[in-house]
């Protein structure tokens, strides 16, 4: 696992905690799983889903009633990330403030990590 002992790999704002707790309660879920997958114009996209249970390799981060499960493939990309929930006039949604992102597409839906360049060069 990609985790610093004694330190949560992600943090959540109060707005994110409230929204995750609301989603978990509505679905009677064990947590809110976040991950990453290949896709989008910048190369990677975040994934989010309500989870019935934590996977055996998930990192679990709890903050009050909110429980985030970090999928194994996303763990090294999520270190130091702040999860927020923003409500705006035209849209509302989760925002990830991730220090590991080196580039994002114009619409903000896909991202690129520094490690991807090195991995692509080896392929």
Image (cartoon, rainbow, N blue to C red):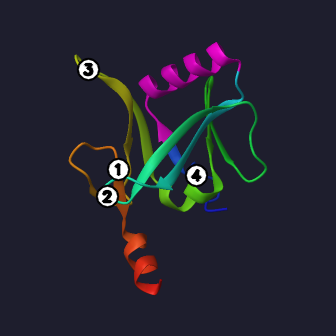
First in residue order: circle 2 vs circle 4: 4
Dot placed on the residue nearer the N-terminal end, 1 or 3: 3
| Circle 3: element type | loop
Q: Quadrant of residue 64?
A: top right
The CA distance from mark 2 to mark 4 is: 29 Å
User: Which of the two marks, 2 or 3, is nearer to us in this view?
Assistant: 2
Distance of label 1 from label 3 (alpha carbons): 20 Å
Pick the quarter of the image with the N terminus. Answer: bottom right
Q: Position of residue 78 (x, y in %)?
A: 49, 54
Give the magenta-colored segment's residue range: 11-28
Task: Tell me if 44 is positioned left or right of 22 in this view.
Answer: left
Mark 2: secondary structure: loop
Q: Around disc 4, counting alpha carbons within 10 Å, would you say few (fewer than 14), some (14 to 19), or many (20 or more)?
A: few
Q: Nearer the viewer, residue 86 or 27?
A: 27
Q: Is residue 121 above or below residue 47?
A: below
Q: Residue at x 30, y 55 (%)?
A: 41
Q: Which residue is mark 1?
A: 110
Q: Nearer the viewer, mark 4 or mark 1?
A: 1
Q: Marks 1 and 2: CB-CB under 8 Å? A: yes
Figure check: 52 above or below 45: above
Give the residue at mark 2: 42
Q: Answer with mark 2 or mark 3, whichever residue precedes in sequence.
A: 2
Residue, disc 4: 7
**Disc 3: which residue:** 88
Magenta span includes 21: yes
Residue 13 part of the magenta-drawn span: yes
Q: CA distance from mark 4 to mark 3?
A: 31 Å
Q: Is residue 79 visible?
A: no
């Amino acid at each position: 696992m990609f985790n610093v002992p004694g330190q949560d790999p992600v943090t959540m704002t109060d707005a994110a905690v409230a929204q995750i707790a609301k989603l978990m309660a509505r679905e009677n879920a064990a947590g809110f799983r976040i991950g990453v997958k290949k896709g989008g114009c910048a190369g990677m996209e975040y994934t989010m889903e309500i989870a019935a249970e934590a996977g055996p390799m998930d990192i679990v981060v709890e903050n009050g009633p909110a429980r985030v499960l970090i999928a194994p493939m996303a763990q090294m990309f999520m270190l130091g990330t702040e999860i927020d929930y923003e409500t705006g006039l035209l849209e509302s949604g989760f925002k990830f403030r991730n220090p590991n992102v080196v580039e994002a597409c114009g619409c903000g839906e896909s991202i690129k990590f520094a490690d991807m360049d090195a991995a692509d060069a080896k392929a």
